[in-house]
Image (cartoon, rainbow, N blue to C red):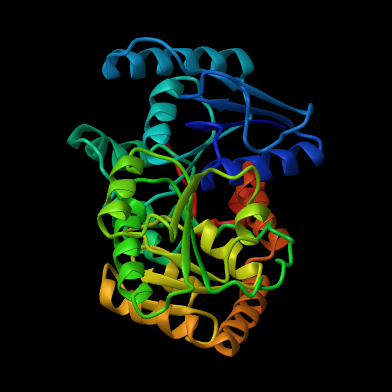
Amino acid sequence: MRIIFVLSGLGAGGAEKVVNILARHRSARGDDVHVLALNAETPESYFAYGRSVRVEALGGGSSVPVFRTAARIARLRGRLRALSPDLVISFLTKVNIMVVLASRGLGLRLVLSERNNFNTQDMSPLWRLARPLAARLAERLVMQTAEAASSLPPALKARAVIIPNPITLQHVRDGATGAGTRVLAVGRLDRQKGFDLLIDAFADTARHTPNMTLTIFGEGPERRALEEQVRRLGLADRVRLPGTTKSPVEWVNAGDIFVLSSRFEGFPNVLLEAMSAGLASIAFDCPWGPSEIIDTPAVGMLVPKEDVRQLADAIGRLASDTTLQQQIGAAGARAVAARYAIQSVLQQWDDVIATPEQAEALYPAARLST
């Protein structure tokens, strides 16, 4: 089978990671696999693919957004026509829409995967209107959580399948350094990730816990604002923003407590990685994902979304009780290992990728037409 995966870029994000896992998996099964990155200008990828997977960058072009988008749709259509795949799988809302537009009239099987919270992410009215229209032309819609699937219009729910992200980080982090409590967060430095809320919560707790530090790994447009917030709060010697790491193992070893402070998520892959490595974890109960991962207080702390005071209290509680840190870290690692094993997740994707005849047997209630 020839499969094309289409995504936005080739950086360190969750969608890029899942595409990399799936592409290597299907290539190992003997498929002819291609990865097309619409916004990347070079085929260099944060996640290594190997020679068996062909990676192409379709970015570049006009600085005017509408012309740039039109050019990328045209380039994508040209590649789809030339490669004539058996299946196209795309990731992220805008990419999904562009794939539907580029593939019109080519008779291709399409699987669209939503990776973010399409109800709350920033999106122009035109993109927001186009999203459900494009989804109607897909054979399957892959959602990451039950919350996401339930947010679909009734006409689309029948073709939705829920597949969470898998655990891929097989690493037992180094033991505590004994140099105080290290609070850790990871993600793109933008408003969605709520690092401004985390810094405020840390400032509150830090007044009572002198040996506690905060490290936020990632890069993005909010760096300058976050650095200014740190300076304003007098935390320059206790809060670090070192940028993106070369591998997840680097950030896992840099903390004792992990915090997910997002205002919204599609499915927080980084929370899975932190828990799988045994980090005691705290998360805002934002839509979507954290409440499905931290489904009991034994495996992690879930606090009301954007509640800085309760986040500060949760950090302070874990910082003052290393035994509780260890108990929650160990229980969280066991829980996510049982629920998000990579082989189980890959099998679910294989069921979606199956030929139309096989898919009809798997999903008899979803005989779809375009």
Q: Position of residue 58 (x, y in %)?
A: 51, 18
Q: Vertically, is 208 above or below 110? A: below
The residue nearer to you, when weighing 216 against 292, is 216
Q: Looking at the image, can residue 295 be seen?
A: no
The residue sitting at 21% across, 35% down in the picture is 124
Q: Position of residue 42 (x, y in %)?
A: 57, 19
Viewport quadrant of the N terminus: top right
- The quarter of the picture where residue 19 lies is top right
Q: Position of residue 244 (x, y in %)?
A: 54, 43
The residue sitting at 60% across, 71% down in the picture is 179
323 with respect to 97 (left or right): right
The residue sitting at 37% across, 54% down in the picture is 193
- The quarter of the picture where residue 335 lies is bottom right
The residue nearer to you, when weighing 112 against 64, is 64
56 with respect to 195 (left or right): right
Q: Vertically, is 314 above or below 261? A: below
336 with respect to 305 (left or right): right
The residue nearer to you, when weighing 20 against 236, is 236
